Each structure stands twice: as C-alpha cells, then as structure tokens.
Image: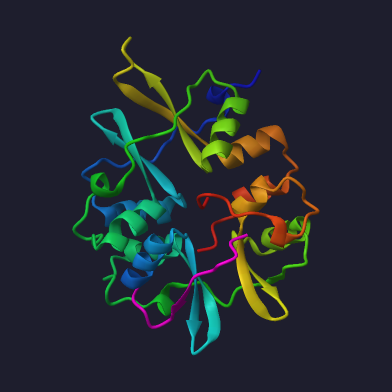
Amino acid sequence: MNPKPIVIDAKSSIERAAEVMRANDVGDVLVVDNGRVQGIMTDRDIVVRAIADYKHPAATLAGQCCSEQPQVISADATADQAIEMMRHHALRRLPVVQDDQLVGILSLGDLAIAEDRRSALADISAAKSNL
Amino acid sequence: MTTLRDVMATDVVTVSSLTPVERAAELMREHELGSLPVVDDGVLTGIVTDRDIVVRGLGQGRYPSTTQVGDVCSREVHTVEPDHTVKVAAKLMRRHALRRIPVVETSDAAGERVRLKGMVSIGDLALVQDPESPLADISQAPPDS
C-alpha cells in the first residue's frame, strides 16, 4: 500500500489536484472537507468526471469530482480480505486505517503483485505505477 | 497453445496525435478504457493513458481544450505480437504494470511500420489463465468512476 496518501481540500481546483498528483507521483488523492474525508479522487476521476464533460479545470472543484465517502479497511486485515472488499464494492482503491487514523491507500495493483495473500496489508509495498 | 491472436480484441478504439485531449477523455469514458493507442496514418505511434492526460497535461498547465493527444502521450509503447503466447503478454504486463497492451505486426523487414492488430487486456489474460480468479472479476467490473 501507499503509506503516505496525499490529501487535498475539496475546494481546490482539479487543476491544482493534477499538479499535486504530478509533483507527488501519485494516481489518487484523498479529498477532505473541513478535516473530514469526503472521498477519493483518482486521475481517472478527473478524466471521466470533468475533462470528458469539457469542464474548465480551473473552475471545477475536487469535491465535485471525487467518489463518494470510500470504504476503508484495517491495516491488520489480510490481502485476501482486501481483495474480497474490493470485489464486493467493485473498488480499485481502498484507504487503510489503524486506530481510526489514515495510514495509507491500497490499490488493486498492490494486491496483484502481492506474493502472499495472507500477508498483512501493511507489508505489501506499493506498485510502481498505478493500474 | 493459445496465442494472443485467439484472445485479443480486434475492435480497437484509437486516437491520433492530433485528437484533442477532451475528445480522448470522452472516448475513454464512453468505452470504459484507461488507455488508447495512438495511430497516425495506420501506424502505431504511441499510447495515451488517463494518467498522461492528468499528469503530463493538466498537471503541467496544459488545458485539455487546447492540447492534443500527441502533446501528452507516450511514444515508447510496450507491444506484443499475435503469435506470442498469453504467458509472454502476462509477463510484460506484470513487469510494466500495464492493464492493456497493443498487439502489433511490423509490415516491412526493417520493422519500421508498426500496425495495430488488436489489444489484450489483463482481464482477457486472467480469464484464460484462471477463470475463477478474483482478479478476473475485479478486472471485469466497471471502473470505480
């Protein structure tokens, strides 16, 4: 999993979000509104929810472009449990929490290269590029 | 033995280097794809992903309304050939973290003109190798967005 999830304010523009994704070499950011996690926005979300609609990037807010409040999973859960949750909810990314604190984001790519499906999520290193 | 010719999709959605990025985004959404091969004059010249549009485009101040695919796409494309096995494609996709890979044929001895014959996706391979695999299910599910 990615242990340093990048966070962006819901009122930031998607142009700003794209800059953040580029600067941090990430494919997703957590969108927060007044400290509360509103959802996840991926580079794909920017493409299909804004650009494909011909929206202006400087005038479109991250909060308008992200997915709904995401499912989360515990860092102590196993890769098998994560796979099941992703399958059940048709997700490709899952925020990971420990004691109610956000500790990372797990992607489908991470699981695809995990060698041991019973290993704890915290032990799965991040895939190099997003799938 | 199963070759890629047997499993590849042949109705491939493509763009050209001159296609506006907004149009490429529209196609990606319409066809639920994360990447589009770039074909110019019948030759595969690159590949553009949703990530390219965001990171190479918008993240660098290139607005989708005034940017063309050629400005943001990757010109280095990992490809396979129709007679390759599923195993070859799987290996390449794993190594480079790809969801889809173009299947090409070179149409002259020097390998200069690379023609797109089809696309193979990770879902296609998962179905061939392990039809019951959860990864096959996840790959086949519609994207989150």
Q: In the image shown, does B69 or A97 lie closer to the viewer?
A: A97
Q: Is residue A86 above or below residue B116?
A: below
Residue A118 placement, left or right of B80: right
Q: Magenta residues, as a range?
A: A1-13
- Residue B103 covered by magenta stretch: no
Q: Position of residue B17 (x, y in %)?
A: 24, 41
As drawn, is A120 to the left or to the right of B56? right
* The N terminus of chain B sits in image quarter: top right
Q: On the rendered structure, is B5 left or right of A16?
A: right
Q: Residue furthest bottom?
A: A34
At 36% across and 52% down in the image, what residue appears? Answer: B52
Image location (x, y in percent) of residue B129? 70, 33
Compared to residue B121, the image places residue A40 above or below, namely below
- Name, please, the residue furthest toward the left: B66
Residue found 27% across the figure and 60% down from its top: B60
- From the image, give the main secondary structure of the stretch colored magenta: loop
Q: Residue at x 29, y 28 (%)?
A: B43
Q: Residue at x 49, y 70 (%)?
A: A6
Q: Quadrant of residue A95?
A: bottom right
The answer to if A2 sits in the magenta stretch is yes
Q: Nearer the viewer, residue A18 or B99?
A: A18
Q: Name the residue at the right extreme.
A: A118
B41 or B74, nearer to the observer: B74
* Coloring basis for residues: rainbow
Q: Is residue B121 above or below residue A74?
A: above
